[in-house]
Amino acid sequence: MTFLVIGAGPAGLATARVFKAAGLPFEVVERHADIGGQWLYGAPSSGVYASTHLISSKTTTAFADYPMPEDWPAYPHHAQVLDYLKNFTRHFGLYPSIRFNRAVTRLTRQEDGWRASFDDGTSLDYQGVVIANGHLTDPELPQIPGSFSGELMHSKTYKNAAIFSGKRVLIVGMGNTGCDIAVDAVHRASKVLWSVRSGNHFAPKFLRGKPADEANHKAKLVLPRRLRSILHEAVLRFVVGSPEDFGLPRPAHRLYDRTPVVNSLVLQHLGQGDIAVRPPIEELDGNRVIFTDGQTDEVDLVLLATGYRITFPFLDEAGLIRELNWKAPAPHLHLNIFPPTDNNLFVVGMIEGAGIGWPGRDLQAKIVAAYLAARKDAPDKAQSFRREIKRHCAAPRPRDAGPHGIFIDFVDYKRVLGKGIERLS
């Protein structure tokens, strides 16, 4: 029987390419009219905005055996990223295996596999399912007391800076998206405020004229994460300065325990007074925003760059708990891929962490393919790996998994995936 791959973004494409090379029968279903996932600008589920560029360099983001063109900038624009993914799909002959404009509405467990129901009313049976639909679809909307008479929106629906023209704007959230949008707003808005709850580390895109993230991937000596964090934090303080120098909270975590902000422009605008920092919101009252320090500002637009909830709309709540070992706010899976039950259900792409890039998704797909091959041809290896899965899933979620429960350190994660593939091969 065939395997179903849900989603034709980078994770789904990585899975399709690996399964095709491994001779595993598969079919990809994609609810939109083309590939790309988040990078399909303008699609209902895409959170990409007009100014979006990669925050990791093209060399660390691209698939290892399919580099982005040399004449492209180090951090390509979203339109170039989509072109790259389309060319990748053509190059590896994946388009014929993808069924577009088709959404999975429900998965149900069958005795010998899975049944997928689609939005056209049809259903098909599959041997197994690889969920690669991403985790940036359903906005996380904080509950803010009071009511607001202006415009309140989430960054999911933000597309270009024209909406800020002449307005007093408050951006909420200190992730990379919030920083990007704050910079966008500076050039159009009459006033830009930035509400932040906790601190984060800031990394420049370039060091000595080269993409700053390349050094981590070229290092011959791999240091433990904590030591890497301490050393690189000292470098960032020397090169960029401390967040506190710009009126931002001091980070309560080490550099490689969360995804850092890769944006130097927002610090420049803070230093120039173009952006004013505010603490968390206490209450909304008409066009006034009251902050936790008692300060009040009148604004016209509040934009929430507050992230996303991890959801699987085609699995009901009972199915999530049973089949994906759901432990809010995310499934608790071995390597963020394998549930404790050998149920032919896998997740690819459910990871957070700077530096993992699409080679990380490729390794995820390869370990799934290696496990499926071992289950057939080397059952002892598969059973040993299955015991490892159960031990991990029975243990508490690691403390360093981040607020969404899916954060990984790219150095450790790639090494563990590589060793797992070797053991299963």
Image (cartoon, rainbow, N blue to C red):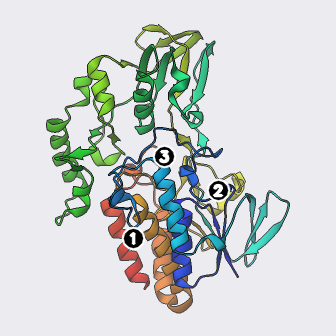
**Disc 1 versus disc 3: distance between alpha carbons?**
21 Å
**Disc 2 versus disc 3: distance between alpha carbons?**
17 Å
The answer, for residue 339, to whether it is visible in the render is no
Q: Quadrant of residue 286?
A: top right
Q: Position of residue 174 (x, y in %)?
A: 40, 32
Q: Pointer 3: what residue?
A: 404
Q: Pointer 1: what residue?
A: 417
Q: Position of residue 161 (x, y in %)?
A: 50, 28
User: From the viewer's perspective, is residue 192 above or below residue 406?
Assistant: above
Q: Earlier in the sequence, mark 1 or mark 2?
A: 2
Q: Earlier in the sequence, mark 1 or mark 3?
A: 3
Q: Pointer 2: what residue?
A: 321
**Disc 1 versus disc 2: distance between alpha carbons?**
25 Å
Q: Quadrant of the C terminus?
A: bottom left
Q: Are marks 1 and 3 in contact (CB under 8 Å)?
A: no
User: From the viewer's perspective, is residue 71 above or below residue 287?
Assistant: below
User: How many residues crowd around disc 2 within 10 Å: few (fewer than 14), some, or many (20 or more)?
Assistant: some
Q: Are marks 2 and 3 in contact (CB under 8 Å)?
A: no
Q: Earlier in the sequence, mark 2 or mark 3?
A: 2
